[in-house]
Each structure stands twice: as structure tokens, then as C-alpha cells.
Amino acid sequence: MKMHGGLSIAVLGLLLTGCGYTPEQRATSGAAIGGATGLALGAAAGGSPGAALAGGVLGAATGAIVGANTRPPPPPGYYPPPPRCAHWGYDVYGRPICVAYYGY
């Protein structure tokens, strides 16, 4: 009976997690998904509360690490802004060109 309660909490947590765009949001959602999956696998494999707890803790830690270190692709049509020019010069034909950029 207690296993069903733990699994329902795990499924509820899994449904409430969303993917974010910052590393902190991705670590949080990865920890929730990994913890829920580890809890379910630990309860199914070991059958004891200790196995379920160990599976949940290991799954949450792994999910947080993987979630924080992955990054979603940029949205379609996104291009990073060009660097700003710090100093303008001229080429041999008299056209203005940037010879130094800010932050580089």
C-alpha cells in the first residue's frame, strides 16, 4: 500500500516538472524527473523503503547533474547579436572596417 502512495507522488512530481532554459531550471526539473524515476525503480527492484529512498536520492542527483549540463537548442530564427565595434578604421579602398571589438 505504501508503494502505491510513493509511486503516485512520483508520478505527480513527474507531471508537474517542466523543462527550463536556464541551467538552474533544467537542474531542478532533471532532479525531479530523476528522483521520481529512481524512486519507482528502487521500489520495484528492492521492495523495501530503503531501496526506494536510495533509488530516489541517486536518481535525483544524477538528474540534476545531467539537467544542469545540457542546454536546449536556440529557438528557430535566433541569431546571436554581432559584437560591438570599439574602434573603426579604413581599408585600402577607403571603406570603414572595425579593427577592435568590445570584450575581446
Image: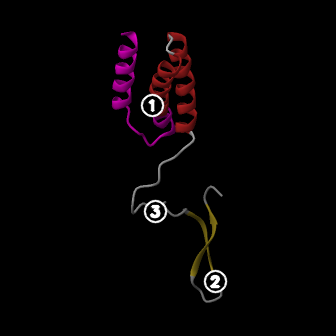
| Label 3, residues with CA under 10 Å away: few <14, some 14-19, many ≥20 | few
Find disc 3 in the rendering and name its residue: 79
Which amino acid, by three-letter code, is at mark 3?
A: Tyr
Is tag 2's residue or tag 1's residue first in the polypeptide sequence? 1
- The disc at residue 33 is 1
- The x, y position of residue 59, in whole percent, is 54, 27
- The disc at residue 82 is none
Residue in the image at 45% along x and 55% along y: 74
- The x, y position of residue 79, in whole percent, is 46, 62
Residue in the image at 39% along x and 23% along y: 10
Find disc 2 in the rendering and name its residue: 91
Q: Classify mark 3: helix, strand or loop.
A: loop
What secondary structure predominates along the stretch shown in magenta? helix
Which amino acid, by three-letter code, is at mark 2?
A: Asp
Say above or below: 57 vs 64: above
Verify whether residue 11 appears in magenta.
yes
Is tag 2's residue or tag 3's residue first in the polypeptide sequence? 3
Q: Nearer the viewer, residue 39 or 45?
A: 45
The segment highlighted magenta reads: 1-27
Eye-nearest disc, 3 or 1: 1
- The x, y position of residue 41, in whole percent, is 49, 25
Farthest residue toward the bottom? 93
Q: On the rendered image, what quadrant is the N terminus found in? A: top left
Eye-nearest disc, 2 or 1: 1
Q: Classify mark 1: helix, strand or loop.
A: helix
